[in-house]
Image (cartoon, grey):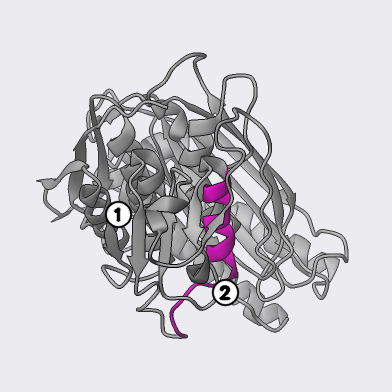
Amino acid sequence: MTVDGAQGEGGGQVLRYAMTCSALTGIPVRVINIRANRPKGGGLRAQHLESAKIVAELTGGCFLEKSLTEGSTELVFDPRGSAASLSGRGSAASLSGRGTRRGGEIQGHASTAASITLMLQAALIPAYMRSTENDPVHVVGPMVRHFGIHLDVKCRRVGYYPRGGGSVRATVSRTSAGRERLQGVQLVGGRDPARKVEFVHVHGYFAGRPIPQDTAEGVITLIEHHMKEELCEFENKQDEFHKYDERLLQLSRAPYEINFRRPLPDSLKDVGYGIVAAVGYNDGSVVGADCLSDKFEFDTVVVWRKVDDDLERLTATILNDVMAGATVDIHMADMCVPLMMAAEGTSAVLFRGPPSSHLETAVRIASQFGGKFSMKELIPAATEHCPGWPGNHKVGALWELRCEGLGLSF
């Protein structure tokens, strides 16, 4: 199977999903034009190489040796660990030896500032394929319990661009002993009045050696107040306006958990912050949004302004998903694609459209490996009058992503 890495958004996502689908189906894959659309140049970088090696170690797969180098624009991978399948192309680099054993621990180190969550995303399904109920492999991934995967993640250390240094430990195992297939998921409640908000969680970090204690504490207080005011204001103000949508009022009535880690020790290499907000519903669905700082020189005014701008975008994203009736956010939608493909039965989720390039690319790659997907708009975008709601009052379209799963056994 040949997958063009220049398709869609043309970044590392194509490589990650191609290897995941290869691991799921046992079909060898050749990815060409890797990261061809990246402005700073294509080819494999340290985090992509490490992700690929983790997947190979989990599956007992092997690579064409000459393709497993930084800067390479082509990667050839056989999840079955058969060097013979790569004959005629060059020597094979095998990372097998663990592929037939259940459970265990895998470690990965990108050696540069990189996205840990994207590396773990690549490892999630291969880790599930090797996991048991009581002997887990360590990886991470959100909202996959619906499919039959149990996850737990601990952040050991936070790291920010450009020097990184973050560390996480996550565990994945099967929710049911002896279960050989992922289970199909139906999260289609949408705007059904019976679908209620059960919780709102906001978590984050704000830390860095150059930041004075009082400034860091002040920014954290700003974050907490901002989230409460933006997402909880509707209950308090409903007497001032003639209409508030029930979907927004639910946000103010739900229990809130807002937790920010205070400044870390001086061992942290760079200044930065990360914020994640999630809204959970009684049907088990969760929509979320996050923001992560870019590198900036420390300046109190700049820091405060940037945090405030990021929070505006984050809360607007959450509110738009809530109003649209999404059961997954747009980022989770594309991450569900390989899970939906592998699961048994029909899976369906709802997201606020239009589909992102990442989602379209994920569906295109999974379809190459036999996935049967469909996407359609259920409710078009519309303008609704809701005073006090930040943004332009336009409610996004509600789309459905549906898949007839392959029912693969592991």
Above or below for 47 versus 306: above
Give the image quarter of residue 131. Answer: top right
The x, y position of residue 310, in whole percent, is 51, 67
235, above or below 228, in the image:
above
**Helix, strand or loop at mark 2:** helix
Q: How many marks?
A: 2
Residue drawn 64% across and 40% down?
170
Residue at which label 1 appears: 362
Magenta-span inclusion, residue 378: no
Please give the name of the residue rendered at 49% of the width and 15% of the height, measured from the top-left corner: 176
Query: For this rendering, which residue is in front, 251 or 359?
Result: 359
Q: Determine whether the residue tagged by mark 1 lies in a helix, strand or loop.
A: helix
Residue marked by disc 2: 306
| Residue at 82% from the left image edge and 66% from the top image edge | 214
**Distance from label 1 to label 2 (Cα)?**
32 Å
Q: Is residue 14 above or below residue 248?
A: below
Q: Quadrant of the N terminus?
A: bottom left
Q: Which stretch did the figure color magenta? A: 41-57
Q: Is residue 263 visible?
A: yes
User: Crowdedness of circle 2 by 10 Å Cα count: few (<14), some, many (20+)?
Assistant: some
Location of residue 188 in the rendering, given as x and y in whole percent from the top left corner: 24, 31
Q: Amino acid at mark 1?
A: Ala
Is 52 a magenta residue? Answer: yes
Query: What residue sits 61% from the left and 60% below the top?
Result: 274
| Residue 322 occupies quadrant | top left
The reply, left or right, for residue 45 in relation to residue 331 is right
The residue under label 2 is which amino acid type? Lys
Which numbered disc flags the more N-terminal residue, 1 or 2? 2
Mark 1 vs mark 2: give the one in front. Answer: 1
